Image: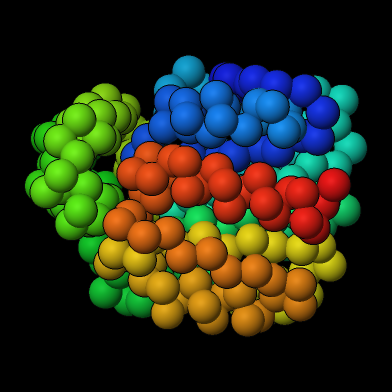
Amino acid sequence: MRLYTRSAGEGLPVVLLHAFPMSSTMWLAQREGLAATCKVITPDLRGFGGSPLGDDEPSVDVMADDVVRLLDEEGIDRAVVGGQSMGGYVTMALCRRHPDRLLGAVLADTKATADSEAARAGRERIAAAVLERGTSVLVDEVLPGLVGSTTRQRRAMVFGRVRGLVQSAPPAAVAWAQRAMAARPDSFGTLRGLKVPALVIVGEEDGLSPPSDAEAMAEAVPDGRLTVIEKAGHLSAVEQPEAFNRAVAAFLRDRIL
C-alpha cells in the first residue's frame, strides 16, 4: 500500500492525518501555514483521495501501519504524528503499535473511548446505506456534525468546501472506514503510557468529540497540553486554520524542537 501524499516545507517531519470522510485536501492551510516551521506531510488515508483501498479487513491498525510504511519510504525514523477525528484514531493506533516512531502526537477533535453499541450500529447503518445509495447519504447523516454553528451561520464558503469534500468521498472507502472506526479499541491506556509530548486540540463547538472528551485525553497523557479553539466545531483545522496552526507551531516550538 502506497499512500498518495502532499508535502510542504523542510525540517522536522510532521505527519497530519485527515478526518472522515475527507482527504489530505483538508490540510491545505496547514501545509501553507506550517511549512516555514517544519516539513508537513499529509497523506490520503487508504481509499480516500489518491490512495487505493486495498483488500485488508477494516482496521485503524492497518491504517496506522500504512503511515509507518510511508515514514519508511520517506526515510524518516521518527516524526510528530497528528490527526483530526478519524485521523486521531489512526494516530492513537500508531502510538499503540509503533511508539518508537513518534517524536510527539497531536490529537484534534477526536476521542480515546471505543464506540458504544449504538454508535457501532450507526456506523454500520451508514456504511450499508452509502454502498447502496452513494455518498449523498453523508450530506444528511454526517455533514451537519462536522462544523460548528459559527461556521454554518457565518462562513458559507468554508461550509461549502466541507460539503464538497464530503460529497466526493468514494463510497467503498466510506464504508471501510466506518467499519474500521467501529472496531477500534479504547485508547486511554495508550495515552497513559505515552512517552512523548501530546497536544490535544478541540473546537469549542464540537458536538461529536466535545471539549470534555479532549480534557480527559489531555489529563491522561503524562506530558499533555490542551488547546480549545473558539468558534470552531469538529473540523477545527478547516474552520479556524490560523488558530489551529498557532497551536501546533507553539507545541512544536515549546515541546519538540
Q: Position of residue 149 (x, y in %)?
A: 18, 57
The quadrant in which residue 162 appears is: top left
Using residue 119 as the reference point, say whether residue 10 is left or right of it: right
Q: Position of residue 140 (x, y in %)?
A: 10, 47
Foreground pick, 111 / 67: 111
Looking at the image, residue 5 lies above or below residue 243: above
Q: Does residue 183 appear anywhere in the picture? A: no
Residue found at x 44% / y 53%: 85
Residue found at x 78% / y 56%: 254
Residue found at x 26% / y 25%: 168
Q: Quadrant of the N terminus?
A: top right
Looking at the image, residue 163 lies above or below residue 190: above
Q: Does residue 171 appear anywhere in the picture? A: yes
Using residue 155 as the reference point, say whether residue 88 is left or right of it: right
Using residue 166 as the reference point, say whether residue 2 is left or right of it: right
The quadrant in which residue 206 appears is: bottom left
Using residue 193 as the reference point, say whether residue 151 is left or right of it: left
Residue found at x 61% / y 74%: 218
Q: Position of residue 219 (x, y in %)?
A: 63, 81
Foreground pick, 203 / 20: 203
Q: Position of residue 191 (x, y in %)?
A: 68, 72
Foreground pick, 2 / 192: 192
